[in-house]
Image (tube, rainbow, N blue to C red):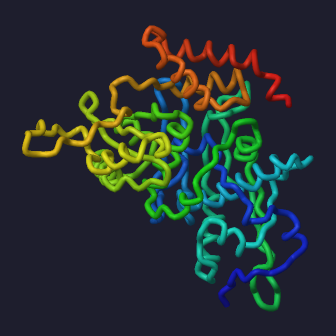
C-alpha cells in the first residue's frame, strides 16, 4: 500500500516546529559554493574529488552503492532544516536540537513539492541518500585535526500507522558538522523562496554560488573564471559540455534575484553575477538585450540606433578574495558577514581612486580587524 503524506495531527510533532507560513529560508554558507551534491537526478556513482591548490581546501563525496549520491534537490531538506534551526535561534530558544520531528506533508509543502504518494516515496529516497552519502573535508575541521568525515544526517525514522500504513511523522537527526555550521554566528544566508522552483541542477547550484558571493557584494558583483567554476561544481562530464550549459543559462538569465553575463578572460570566459536590485531597470533591459557582451559588436551608424550601454559590472577591475582569505577572516573575526563588509570596503575605495590598495586582501583584512575592534560589542548584544 502506498503511504500518502496526509496531514495528521500529532502533538509530539506539531508543537515542535515554527508555523510553516512564517518560515524564512536560510542556507548553510559552507555548502553553497563547493561540490557537495550531484547536479543530476540520475543515480550518480562517481565520487567527487575537489581540492583548491591555493588554500588547500578539499571536499570528497562518496556515493552509496545502493542509493547513489545525495543530489542538489535532496539538499532542499537541509535548507528546510537550516531554516527551522535559524528560526529557533532567532526566537532565542534555550536549546536548539539536532533532532527534528515533522510531518512529511508540511516539509513537502514548504519546499514546493506535491504531496502525493509518489512525492512521499521520493522524500524517503532523499533521506536515504542524505544518510548514506559520505563527505570528507577540512572545512571547519576542529583545531588539531586534518579533516572530518560525516553524512548529512545521522539517522532518520518514520512513525507509520500499523493499521493504515500511513506516515504520522518523521524524525531526522542532523550531522554535527551541518548543525554547527547552521547555528554558529554568520553560518547561514537567506535565500529567495523562488529557489525551489528552479528546475535545473546546474541552475540551482549556480544560484547558491551567486547568493554567497554576489549577494552581499553590492553593485560590484562577483566574477569567476569558467574553469574555476567548473572545478567548484563537481559536475560530471567534460568542461566543454559544462561551458556550453553555462552559456545557455546566461542567455536565459532567469536566476531569481541575480543577473548574469559573460566576458572574455585570458583564454576562457569569465562569468559575472550581480544582484538585480543593484541594477537599474534601464540597465537590466540593456543586459537582457545583450546577454553575451564578450562578442564584438559593430559601431553604430547614423541610420541605426546605438547599442544599449554596457553595465558598470563589466569594468575590468573586480576585487576578489581568495578562499583562504575568507576563511582566515571568519576564524579571526567570527560573527561578521564578510561580504557585507567587503561591499562597504569597496564602496569606500570607490570614492577615491588613490585609495586602491596594492594588496587588496591584506588591506581588507586590516579593515575588518579595525571594524571588529570598534564594534565587537554588537556581537555580545
Horizontal side, residue 133 vs residue 167: left or right: left
Residue drawn at (65%, 87%), measured in percent from left and top? 2
Residue 65 visible in the picture: no
Residue drawn at (70%, 36%), measured in percent from left and top? 186
* Nearer to us in this view, 311 or 74: 311
Expressed as whole percent of the image width and height from the top left, the position of residue 54 reads 48, 24
Residue 42 in which image quadrant:
bottom left
Horizontal side, residue 44 vs residue 133: left or right: left
Expressed as whole percent of the image width and height from the top left, the position of residue 222 reads 45, 34
Residue 18 visible in the picture: yes
Q: How many marks?
A: 0
Q: Quadrant of the N terminus?
A: bottom right
Q: As drawn, which residue projects farthest toward the front?
A: 302
Residue 105 sits above or below residue 365 on the image: below
Expressed as whole percent of the image width and height from the top left, the position of residue 326 reads 58, 26
* Nearer to us in this view, 273 or 165: 273
Residue drawn at (45%, 35%), measured in percent from left and top? 221
Residue drawn at (69%, 14%), measured in percent from left and top? 370
Amino acid at each position: 500500500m502506498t503511504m500518502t503524506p496526509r496531514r495528521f495531527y500529532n502533538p509530539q510533532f506539531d508543537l515542535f516546529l515554527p508555523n510553516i507560513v512564517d518560515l524564512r529560508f536560510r542556507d548553510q554558507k559552507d555548502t553553497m559554493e563547493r561540490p557537495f551534491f550531484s547536479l543530476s537526478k540520475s543515480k550518480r556513482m562517481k565520487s567527487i574529488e575537489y581540492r583548491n591548490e591555493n588554500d588547500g581546501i578539499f571536499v570528497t563525496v562518496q556515493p552509496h552503492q545502493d542509493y547513489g549520491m545525495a543530489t542538489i534537490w535532496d539538499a532542499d531538506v537541509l535548507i528546510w532544516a537550516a531554516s527551522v534551526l535559524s528560526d529557533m535561534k532567532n526566537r532565542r530558544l534555550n536549546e536548539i536540537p539536532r533532532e527534528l520531528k515533522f510531518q512529511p506533508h508540511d516539509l513537502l509543502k514548504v519546499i514546493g513539492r506535491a504531496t502525493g504518494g509518489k512525492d512521499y516515496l521520493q522524500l524517503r529516497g532523499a533521506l536515504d541518500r542524505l544518510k548514506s552519502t559520505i563527505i570528507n573535508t577540512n572545512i571547519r575541521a576542529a583545531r588539531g585535526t586534518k579533516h572530518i568525515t560525516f553524512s548529512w544526517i545521522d539517522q532518520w525514522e518514520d512513525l507509520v500507522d500499523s493499521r493504515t500504513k500511513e506516515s504520522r511523522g518523521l524524525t531526522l537527526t542532523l550531522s554535527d558538522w551541518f548543525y554547527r555550521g547552521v547555528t554558529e554566528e554568520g553560518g547561514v544566508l537567506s535565500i529567495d523562496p523562488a529557489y525551489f522552483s528552479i528546475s535545473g541542477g546546474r541552475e540551482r547550484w549556480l544560484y547558491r554560488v551567486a547568493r554567497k558571493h554576489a549577494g552581499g557584494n553590492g553593485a560590484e558583483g562577483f566574477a569567476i573564471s569558467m574553469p574555476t567554476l567548473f572545478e567548484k561544481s563537481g559536475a560530471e562530464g567534460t568542461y566543454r559540455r559544462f561551458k556550453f550549459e553555462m552559456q545557455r543559462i546566461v542567455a536565459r538569465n532567469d536566476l531569481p534575484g541575480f543577473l548574469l553575463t559573460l566576458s572574455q578572460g585570458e583564454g576562457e570566459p569569465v562569468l559575472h553575477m550581480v544582484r538585480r536590485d543593484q541594477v537599474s531597470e534601464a540597465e537590466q533591459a540593456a543586459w537582457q538585450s545583450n546577454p553575451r557582451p564578450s562578442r564584438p559588436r559593430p559601431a553604430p551608424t547614423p541610420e541605426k540606433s546605438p547599442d544599449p550601454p554596457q553595465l558598470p559590472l563589466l569594468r575590468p577591475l573586480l576585487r576578489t578574495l581568495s578562499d583562504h582569505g575568507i576563511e582566515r577572516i571568519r576564524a579571526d573575526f567570527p560573527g561578521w558577514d564578510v561580504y557585507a563588509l567587503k561591499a562597504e570596503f569597496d564602496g569606500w575605495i570607490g570614492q577615491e581612486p588613490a585609495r586602491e590598495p596594492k594588496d587588496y586582501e591584506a588591506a581588507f583584512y586590516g579593515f575588518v580587524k579595525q571594524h571588529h575592534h570598534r564594534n565587537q560589542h554588537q556581537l555580545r548584544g
